[in-house]
Amino acid sequence: MGIFFNSWNDLGRVLILGILGYISLVILLRVSGNRTLSKLNAFDFVVTIALGSTFGSFILNKNISLADGVMGFAVLIGMQYVVSWLTVRSKAVKNMIKSEPSLVYYNGEYLEDSMKRSRVIETEIEQSVRNQGYANLEQVEAVVLETDGSFSVISKPEKEAKKVDIAGLKV
């Protein structure tokens, strides 16, 4: 019987902690600002996953109280805030936390060295081009692998002779 149902008390605990935990998490996220759940870098991704794991653990684990769960949320959100604050103010922290965008396709050529460093294959680049509405690579000047793992596709300029200036990237 324990596999399918333990007790009404257990269900009530999950319900109450789920509701209170959800409300606590929403409040903490609103106070901490939009950056907390952004998808800017790997650190932000880790925080998002850790928040979900913490939420699930304290709802289902009878040995973790609401106060413990909320403290877990506060520590994760607080650390994310401190790291993002330091990233803006310290070049060393920024270099440790942030990655740089990578140019993986330019002017009709796959940039093999950049692709190897970024662990990207040609079919992923081609898929990103199609996903952004281009029929083929002939319409594309460049493809950039962004710091959040997404691809930016830059179309060819109206006049072929005109060079594209790709913000922040060395061509």
Image (cartoon, helix red, strand yellow):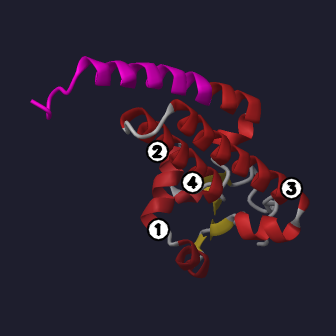
Tag 3 and tag 2, C-beta contact below 8 Å: no
Q: Earlier in the sequence, mark 2 or mark 1?
A: 2
Q: Quadrant of the C terminus?
A: bottom right
Residue type at mark 2: give it.
Ser
* Residue 53: numbered disc: 2
- Indicate which disc residue 46 carries: 4
Marks 4 & 3, CB-CB < 8 Å contact: no
In the picture, the quarter occupied by the N terminus is top left
Residue 106 visible: no
Q: Which residue is mark 3?
A: 88
Query: Disc 1 or 3, which lies upstream in sequence?
Result: 3
Magenta span: predominant SS is: helix
Which of disc 1 and disc 4 is earlier in sequence?
A: 4
Q: Is residue 70 left or right of residue 15?
A: right
Circles 4 and 1: CB distance less than 8 Å? no
Image side of residue 92 versus residue 104, left or right: right
Mark 3 or mark 2: which comes first in sequence? 2
The answer for how far apart the CA atoms under marks 4 and 2 are is: 10 Å
Secondary element at tag 1: helix
Which amino acid type corresponds to the residue marked 4 in the rendered image? Val
C-alpha distance separating marks 2 and 1 = 34 Å
Q: Which residues are magenta?
A: 1-25
Q: Where residue 96 sits in the image (x, y, percent)? A: 73, 70
Q: Taking 126 as reference, is 74 above or below it?
A: above
Secondary structure under the numbered disc 2 in the rendered image: helix
Q: CA distance from mark 4 to mark 1?
A: 27 Å
Give the vertical position of 147 relative to 22 (above or below).
Answer: below
The residue tagged 1 is 122
Magenta stretch: includes residue 15: yes
**Amino acid type at mark 3:** Val
